[in-house]
């Protein structure tokens, strides 16, 4: 009985492993079965086995796969079995009369695939983001200037278009498994599989359409939650009286810090939910509590009472004046300015002799940056669990989150003045948080009901497209209502 020497069109990783084996005429890879399709990784057609005997190969297409979670791949080669697989994979004989067919362990097989490819996907995305940020800082905003509405609208349109266009890349990358995307990818298991005792989160194949929908829903959710962030940033800038021409610098470094913080939080959260899937219940409950808190408790808008500001002033030397766009200064006197006769621009005069301190001090610009970072950290604690309700795939979570906050600077300059006119925006954000929290609980709670003595059930999954329509519909309704029912201004007594 000669083994088949062709590769099934199933999973690109298996195709690569198979093709490498076929490069050597002494080695042929033959797929006999896989229960990986239970995890959604692949579906092999006409390849279910009827026992270990290769003589049953003719009836394989009608046989059911075995009820175990091993990956059974048979390898036929002319060399002696003791020498192992030509690809370096460990092989062990199952039977002496199997015509040199041997099963390969799942771990060994998965290790043979190019798992490092996904790291290149992350590296490429981070390099793209860094390139845009460097271009922004060194070319587009080399000189501090006030960002006008026209410039802000142009940049908002650019970042929005870029974020939406990335969904096209996601579609083709996952559909064609570029750089391993969509292979061995964390995803929520089918309801039937979880009801039968399977895990809520499994590793499997995710195709382009589903990945693109997940990215778009995550992007819209993160973008909408960023609206509330804009309002708080406006309060911070007003309290510290940050000059308009320096606000972009604060936002730039604030966004850079947010990228690092959110990246760390996303990969930490992703690792936690993959290992402890019950954490999703905590995420869902936290989102509901956050929505309830936003609805019932009015936040403290007094930045001076913030514990971070008080702590920074206690630990570090501070000055009450701005030293241009510097975060740290050695000046002890407020700088003066004069107009340059050659350029006509206002320039800072040199510090008076003997006025420079030996110690550095932090300026109000740094305190504003510190508050922006803390604000983003607080909002990230809400927004990151929200996107895990859509997908556990860290690449989708990371890219949609980063693209949403990359356009936050331009969006701020567009909406900082108008944000107070959208009176129904906050109720809309509360509803979105509550919806995402309920979605996460419906999916994560039923499999764990047995813990409290109830009967476990199948997770209730809300379709990704439905989630997208709910979020967009809520935002659209809030916008229309804000226009049709504007906030009444208090009339002055005559």
Image (spheres, rainbow, N blue to C red):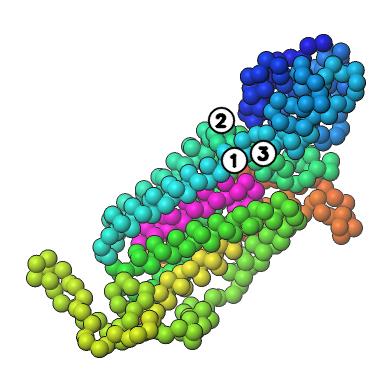
Q: Which residue sits at x=44%, y=61%?
A: 255
Q: Tell me which label, 2 or 3, sits earlier in the chain.
A: 2
Nearest the camera: 112 or 38? 112
Q: Secondary structure at mark 1?
A: loop
Q: Crowding near pointer 2: few (<14 within 10 Å), some, many (20+)?
A: some
Q: Which mark is residue 333?
A: none
Residue topped by disc 3: 184
Q: Residue 246, percent across and down?
A: 32, 69
Residue numbers of the magenta segment: 386-413
Task: Evaluate whether residue 402 shows in this view.
Answer: yes
Judge left or right: residue 405 versus residue 296: left
The CA span between labels 2 and 3 is: 14 Å
Residue topped by disc 2: 176
Nearest the camera: 233 or 271? 271
Can residue 159 be found in the magenta stretch?
Answer: no
Residue topped by disc 1: 116
Q: Tell me which label, 2 or 1, sits earlier in the chain.
A: 1
Q: Which residue sits at x=70%, y=44%?
A: 188
The CA span between labels 3 and 1 is: 12 Å
Q: Is residue 258 above or below residue 356?
A: above
Q: Quadrant of the C terminus?
A: bottom left
Task: Evaluate whether residue 224 shows in this view.
Answer: no
Judge left or right: residue 428 versus residue 450: left
- Quarter of the figure with residue 36: top right
Q: Secondary structure at mark 2?
A: helix
Q: Which residue sits at x=71%, y=31%?
A: 88
């Amino acid at each position: 009985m000669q083994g088949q020497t062709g590769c099934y069109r199933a999973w690109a990783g298996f195709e690569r492993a198979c093709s490498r084996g076929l490069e050597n005429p002494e080695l042929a890879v033959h797929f006999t079965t896989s229960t990986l399709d239970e995890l959604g990784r692949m579906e092999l057609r006409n390849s279910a086995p009827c026992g270990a005997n290769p003589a049953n190969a003719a009836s394989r297409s009608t046989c059911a796969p075995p009820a175990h979670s091993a990956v059974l791949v048979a390898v036929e080669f002319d060399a002696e079995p003791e020498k192992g697989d030509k690809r370096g994979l460990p092989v062990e004989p199952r039977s002496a009369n199997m015509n040199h067919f041997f099963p390969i362990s799942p771990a060994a097989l998965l290790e043979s695939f190019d798992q490092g490819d996904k790291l290149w996907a992350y590296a490429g995305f981070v390099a793209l983001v860094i390139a845009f940020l460097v271009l922004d800082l060194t070319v587009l905003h080399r000189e501090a200037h006030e960002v006008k509405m026209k410039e802000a609208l142009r940049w908002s349109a650019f970042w929005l278009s870029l974020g939406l266009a990335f969904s096209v890349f996601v579609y083709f990358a996952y559909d064609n498994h570029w750089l391993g995307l969509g292979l061995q990818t964390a995803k929520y298991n089918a309801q039937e599989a979880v009801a039968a005792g399977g895990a809520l989160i499994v590793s499997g194949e995710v195709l382009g359409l589903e990945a693109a929908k997940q990215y778009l829903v995550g992007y819209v959710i993160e973008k909408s939650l960023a609206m509330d962030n804009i309002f708080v940033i406006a309060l911070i800038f007003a309290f510290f009286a940050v000059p308009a021409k320096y606000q972009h610098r604060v936002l730039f470094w604030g966004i850079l810090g947010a990228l690092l913080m959110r990246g760390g939080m996303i990969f930490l959260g992703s690792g936690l939910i993959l290992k402890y899937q019950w954490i999703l219940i905590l995420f869902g409950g936290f989102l509901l509590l956050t929505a309830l808190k936003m609805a019932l408790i009015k936040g403290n808008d007094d930045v001076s009472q913030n514990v971070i500001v008080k702590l920074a002033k206690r630990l570090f030397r501070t000055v009450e004046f701005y030293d241009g766009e510097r975060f740290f200064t050695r000046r002890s006197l407020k700088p003066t300015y004069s107009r340059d006769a050659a350029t006509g621009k206002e320039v800072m005069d040199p510090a008076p002799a003997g006025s420079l301190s030996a110690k550095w001090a932090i300026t109000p610009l740094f305190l504003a940056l510190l508050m922006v970072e803390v604000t983003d950290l607080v909002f990230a604690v809400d927004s990151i669990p929200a996107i895990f309700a859509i997908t556990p795939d860290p690449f989708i979570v990371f890219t949609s989150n980063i693209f949403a906050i990359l356009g936050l600077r331009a969006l701020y300059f567009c909406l900082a003045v108008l944000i107070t006119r959208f009176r129904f925006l906050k109720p809309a954000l509360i509803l979105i948080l509550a919806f995402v929290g309920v979605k996460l609980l419906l999916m994560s709670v039923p499999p764990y009901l047995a813990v409290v003595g109830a009967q476990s059930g199948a997770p209730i999954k809300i379709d990704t497209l439905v989630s997208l329509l709910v979020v967009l519909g809520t935002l659209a309704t809030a916008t229309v209502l804000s226009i049709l029912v504007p906030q009444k201004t208090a009339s002055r007594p005559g």
